[in-house]
Amino acid sequence: MRIDIISVLPDLMRSPFETSILKRAMEKGLAEVHFHNVRDFATNKHRQIDDAPYGGGAGMVMMVEPLDLCISKLKSERHYDEIIYMTPDGETLNQRMANQLSTVQNLIFLCGHYKGIDQRVRDLHITKEISIGD
């Protein structure tokens, strides 16, 4: 299984994969995890990734361009079974869903930031929205 994680803070995400069950799965070749910094796909000199929501609204969201570039690059390299956006308003992760996801080959997890992601990214790329619960 290959898992690609897209985040603004990929270094923060690494530590859970360096211990316990996840580490052993990676050492045995059962899983591989790759981290992608969305700022690497920013199109301006300041590597900005946040903007006001498309169509207006309060707060800031992650811009469509860097996310689209990152996800499109990954999709050009292989087929992904699911592109999952981690969000509080997604379907709550449970054992049944975890079992189902454990049977696929390639997953992308998009970790939101600020007030979330631009709605166009959800419409264009996201196949599942998951919440880890309250």
Image: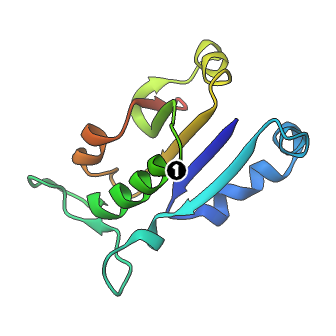
Image position of 50 with respect to 83: above or below? below
Location of residue 80 in the rendering, given as x and y in whole percent from the top left corner: 51, 36
91 and 109: which is toward the camera:
109
Q: In this view, does 29 lie to the left or right of 109?
A: right
Is residue 111 at least partly visible in the picture?
Answer: no
Q: How many labels does the image show?
A: 1
Provide residue 24's location: percent of width, then percent of height. Answer: 90, 41
Q: Is residue 32 visible?
A: yes
Residue to which mark 1 is pinned: 77
* Residue at 34% across, 87% down: 45
Q: How crowded is mark 1: few (under 14 residues within 10 Å), some or many (20 or more)?
A: few
Q: At x 81% / y 40%, what residue is drawn?
A: 22
Label 1 amino acid?
Glu
Query: Which quarter shows the N terminus?
Result: top right
Question: Would you place residue 37 above or below residue 67 in this image?
Answer: below
Q: In this view, does 71 lie above or below 130?
A: below
Q: Which of 123 and 13 is in front in this view?
A: 123
